[in-house]
Image (spheres, rainbow, N blue to C red):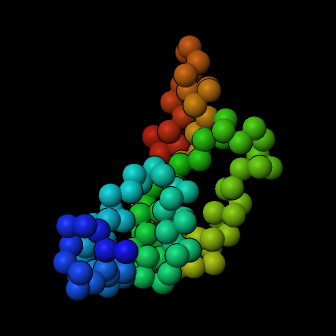
């Protein structure tokens, strides 16, 4: 079905028929903190995988209070992922495990593991 404002001979193009710069701009529009959407983009096709993976791995933060116990946190899966791929490991610019519950407690110290080193 062609929208009313387009000529009848107008051709709809798929996402991957767009210039790569435009597709990259669309991927860059995704909030970097929205890891689920970025991960889903990596599963769509090779082209979107190559554009979304660098954003997905750039800044990795695990909030341990979100997972309840260490057994449910995806940290071991993430570690296996970067250890099995030098490319993915090279994409990680920062990594942190935080606990926002403790960080918001009165008198709590900094939980930023990079400032503690």
Residue 93: x %, y % from top left: 42, 60
Residue 88 can be seen, yes or no: no
- In-front residue for pair 96/116: 96
Tell me what residue is drawn at x 41 percent, y 54 percent. Answer: 32
Q: Position of residue 27 (x, y in %)?
A: 36, 65
Q: Quadrant of residue 26?
A: bottom left
Q: Residue at x 56, y 74 (%)?
A: 43
Decide: is 77 above or below 86. above
Q: Give the image location of residue 7, x and y in percent.
A: 19, 78
- Judged left or right of residue 94, residue 71 is right
Along the line of sight, the residue nearer the viewer: 15 or 7: 7
Residue placed most toward the observer, 81 or 83: 81
Q: 94 above or below 70?
A: below
- Identified at 59% across, 18% down, the residue is 105
Q: Position of residue 90 (x, y in %)?
A: 46, 72
Question: How many labels, in total?
Answer: 0
Residue shown at the point (48%, 62%) measured from the top left: 38
| Residue 36 in view of the camera | yes
In this view, 35 is above or below 6: above
């Amino acid at each position: 079905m062609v929208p009313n404002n387009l000529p009848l001979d107008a051709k709809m193009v798929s996402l991957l028929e767009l210039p790569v710069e435009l597709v990259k701009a669309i991927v860059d529009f995704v909030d970097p903190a929205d890891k689920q959407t970025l991960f889903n983009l990596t599963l769509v096709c090779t082209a979107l995988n190559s554009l979304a993976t660098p954003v997905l791995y750039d800044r990795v933060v695990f909030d341990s209070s979100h997972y309840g116990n260490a057994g449910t946190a995806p940290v071991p899966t993430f570690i296996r992922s970067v250890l099995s791929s030098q490319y993915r490991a090279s994409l990680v610019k920062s990594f942190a495990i935080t606990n926002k519950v403790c960080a918001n407690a009165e008198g709590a110290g900094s939980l930023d593991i990079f400032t503690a080193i």
